[in-house]
Image (cartoon, rainbow, N blue to C red):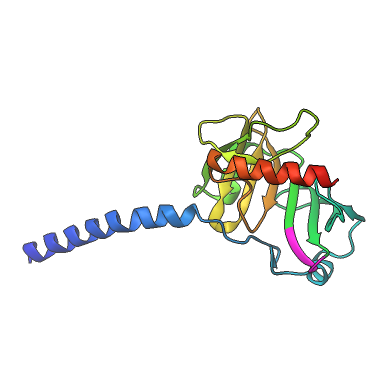
Amino acid sequence: MLQLLLILIIIMQAADVLCCPVQALNDRTWRPATYQGLTIGKSTRSDMLRVLGKPLSSGPSADQDPPYPIIWNEYGRITGDTPGTLAVEVDSRNNRIVSISVSPDRMTKEEAIKLFGDNYLLMGYQFCKGLPPEAEVGPVYEDPKSSEIDYLEYRNRGIAIHLDYQGMVNSIYYVAEPIGLSSKAGCRKALERYRRKSKRR
């Protein structure tokens, strides 16, 4: 009986060793977020209106190229677990929601972790070098050692939480894909695309 128990313990320990890297890998994979039943990349503008009602205002989102297909829908103040302001971006080409953002009135990093859970990834980002001086924004890439741009990420839930330099939550983003390049190696192609787009403006 004792031998059987020892064998079971060894099997369980081996299973833990095998499962953990897979779980860690899964947690680093981005999946579409869901906010109040609205799934990013799947739910439509009609779904947005049905769930959230009519926005206070709508207009083209900033930092995009003509014909400015992404529409920013401002909903103003919200209450609940994260009181603050709410906005929804919709792609007018297919009427699908591409992101939802909540800007809390006041939330610390610790409060965000308490609300969303411990299964997060703390990720830093840096801007790709070589942007023209007049550029206001540009592509960013993952750099865990960077403190230039900090995010708490719940990738398997599609949630990216932007932290400011004091560790306060700036915005909570519900997305369907990575918010930046996976490495610095991708900067060259990203900057080439950025420059081509800038010439067409």
Q: Position of residue 143 (x, y in %)?
A: 53, 36
Which of the 4 image quadrants contains residue 108? top right
Measuring 67% from the left and 32% from the top, which residue is drawn there? 164
Q: Position of residue 93 (x, y in %)?
A: 81, 66
Q: Would you identify the image quadrant in which residue 69 lies?
A: bottom right
Camera sees residue 76 = no
Residue at (59%, 45%) from the top-left corner? 181
54 relative to 144, above or below = below
Is residue 186 covered in magenta? no
- Compare residues 104 and 183 and report the one nearer the observer: 183
How many marks do you count on the picture? 0
Residue, far right: 57
The answer to whether residue 132 is left or right of residue 67 is left
Q: Is residue 125 visible?
A: yes
Horizontal placement of 42 versus 120: left or right?
A: right
Residue 177: image location, x then y, percent: 62, 56
- In which quadrant will I find the C terminus? top right
Taking the image as shown, residue 187 lies to the left or right of residue 84, namely: left
Q: Is residue 195 left or right of residue 176?
A: right
Say which quarter of the image contains residue 199.
top right
Magenta stretch contains residue 94: yes
Where is residue 90 drawn, in percent x and y? 80, 61
User: Quick one: quadrant of the N terminus?
Assistant: bottom left
Magenta stretch? 93-98
